[in-house]
Image (tube, grey):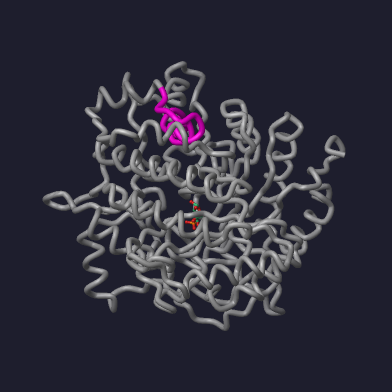
């Protein structure tokens, strides 16, 4: 059957979301504020004329600019506070996903819904009860919930008072939060993952992972360089991730827990060996996180970078043991695009610090948001990952944001979503034929949601269209887009009906 184009019978088809991009209800039922509640809207008019590649780190902010947003909220619009109101609409939204045939729903828990400040002595029962309702609804519909413990969702208090994951206090608070949710949802949640796109922490988007810094004197980007600090935060997150794995295994032996890496596949710009060397350098920085999470130790190559750039990580006595013990059960990645590498003339590499493509690939089309579309790259990356880790792989995000609105008859003709999905599912099947153990695929944003990068609604991913604009205007009505029927058929035919 697999040779004839089918996917395995137990393949987990579905979609992925994050609490801060869908839930809304930011101050209801005892939820505390998170950094993402202060991410302002960058609508397409504000971006007009700007090169998308040179935009400032949108959800990477300094303590000073965050302070300004807290003191003058009237100057901004914060769309993540309203999301798509999933907090109140989860039942009908999940029913629509079940109608498409979803086997898995990836979502995240909002840490500050459970612990309003991140480190409170007791959890917020109303927050815990909300996720009980969501998981129960998933189970009732035959959908497996897959839960990210931290998806760009640091409680504001831990960010402002402790610099987020710069501090070990945050590591301890995270472990307590994990223990609480593992105990509470034991038997209801089988699939967990620790940090969404953990590799953002060394790029210019570290605030999404909850690192807050002061602006440098004289202004400027607080996140440029600072390798020592970034890798200290990375170390702390890796320890926090390992602690979560250990706790998960202790509390619920039937559950499994994975990582989540924004897999950045790199191609050499030319056949010059130096360009290929640059690919190796960049790959090392991407592999670094999963190497630690899957093998439980620091890889050999990072030591040269640490030496050459004066990175001196402070570790606690049992950190290395914790990393060794707390390894992941499966690998998960988000895959959106590939990158071109050109030699930078350095013998000792440093990470590019950017997660957007700097050099255009002339062979690839781009989405309206300038993201190159590369289905073949997915097959390549799946092979690379499997070859390295020999662990089952879950594609926890893949998708394409487009500007699409219903026509005069209320129909959403999102052919670009269909094309994108078709190309990537085809290549995923090729990878399975290659022998790669891929056990599931989650489309990013099966229901329109607030963009992580720009906080727009206008950038739509959904098979389910949501009638809300960037400013929260609209009825909130859900409409089945053309891709809804496509994905339904695809899942129903186990991937044969492309
Ligand atoms: C991933 C994130 O980086 O990309 C998601 O995990 C995010 O949270 C997705 O939404 C798409 O990015 P954007 O900026 O289009 O929302």
Q: Residue at x 53, y 72 (%)?
A: 130
Left or right: 78, with 247 as reference point: left
Which image quarter is the N terminus in? top right
Residue 98 seen in the figure: yes
255 displayed left or right of 315? right
Can residue 339 be seen here? no
Q: Main secondary structure of the magenta part?
A: helix
Where residue 183 sits in the image (x, y, percent)? 52, 58
The residue under the point 73% across, 67% down is 141
Q: Nearer the viewer, residue 224 or 256?
A: 256
Give the percent coordinates (x, y) of residue 399: 60, 53
User: In the orientation shown, which residue stands out farthest toward the bottom?
Assistant: 475
Height in image: 346 above or below 20? above
In x, y percent, where is residue 26?
A: 42, 74
Check if residue 421 falls in the magenta segment. no
Depth check: give the residue in front, 445 or 249. Answer: 249
Q: Is residue 444 above or below residue 99?
A: above
Return the residue nearer the eye: 302 or 481: 302
Q: Position of residue 66 (x, y in %)?
A: 26, 63
Magenta residues span 283-299
Q: Nearer the viewer, residue 39 or 393?
A: 393
The quadrant holding residue 73 is: bottom left
């Amino acid at each position: 059957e697999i040779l004839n184009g089918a996917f395995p019978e137990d393949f987990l088809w579905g979609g992925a979301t994050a609490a801060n991009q869908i839930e809304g209800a930011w101050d209801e039922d005892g939820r505390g504020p998170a950094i993402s509640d202060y991410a302002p809207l960058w609508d397409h008019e504000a971006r007009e004329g700007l090169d998308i590649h040179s935009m400032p780190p949108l959800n990477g902010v300094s303590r000073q600019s965050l302070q300004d947003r807290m003191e003058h909220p009237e100057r901004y619009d914060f769309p993540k506070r309203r999301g798509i109101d999933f907090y109140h609409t989860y039942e009908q939204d999940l029913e629509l996903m079940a109608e498409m045939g979803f086997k898995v729903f990836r979502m995240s828990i909002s840490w500050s819904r459970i612990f309003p400040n991140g480190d409170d002595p007791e959890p917020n029962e109303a927050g815990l009860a909300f996720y009980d309702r969501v998981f129960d609804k998933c189970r009732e519909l035959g959908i497996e919930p897959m839960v990210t413990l931290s998806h760009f969702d640091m409680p504001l208090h831990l960010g402002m008072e402790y610099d987020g994951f710069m501090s070990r206090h945050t590591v301890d608070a995270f472990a307590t939060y994990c223990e609480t949710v593992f105990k509470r949802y034991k038997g209801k949640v089988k699939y967990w993952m620790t940090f969404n796109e953990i590799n953002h922490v060394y790029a210019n988007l570290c605030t999404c992972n909850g690192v807050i810094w002061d602006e440098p004197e004289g202004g400027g980007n607080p996140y440029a360089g600072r390798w020592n600090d970034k890798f200290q935060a990375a170390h702390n997150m890796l320890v926090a991730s390992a602690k979560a794995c250990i706790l998960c295994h202790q509390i619920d032996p039937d559950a499994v827990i994975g990582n989540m890496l924004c897999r950045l596949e790199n191609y050499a710009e030319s056949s010059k060996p130096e360009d290929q060397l640059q690919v190796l350098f960049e790959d090392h920085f991407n592999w670094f996180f999963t190497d630690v999470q899957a093998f439980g130790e620091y890889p050999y190559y990072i030591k040269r970078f640490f030496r050459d750039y004066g990175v001196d990580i402070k570790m606690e006595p049992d950190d290395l043991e914790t990393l060794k013990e707390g390894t992941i059960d499966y690998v998960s990645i988000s895959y959106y695009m590939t990158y071109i590498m050109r030699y930078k003339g350095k013998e000792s590499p440093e990470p590019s610090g950017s997660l957007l493509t700097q050099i255009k690939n002339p062979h690839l089309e781009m989405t309206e948001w300038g993201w190159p579309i590369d289905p073949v790259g997915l097959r390549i990356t799946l092979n690379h990952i499997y070859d390295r880790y020999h662990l089952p792989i879950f594609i926890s995000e893949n998708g394409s944001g487009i500007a699409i609105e219903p026509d005069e008859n209320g129909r959403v003709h999102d052919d670009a979503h269909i094309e994108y999905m078709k190309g990537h599912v085809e290549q995923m099947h090729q990878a399975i034929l290659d022998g790669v153990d891929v056990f599931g695929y989650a489309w990013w944003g099966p229901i329109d949601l607030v963009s992580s990068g720009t906080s727009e609604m206008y950038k739509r991913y959904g098979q389910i269209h949501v009638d809300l604009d960037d400013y929260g205007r609209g009825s909130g009505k859900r409409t089945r887009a053309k891709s809804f029927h496509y994905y339904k058929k695809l899942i129903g035919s186990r991937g044969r009906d492309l």
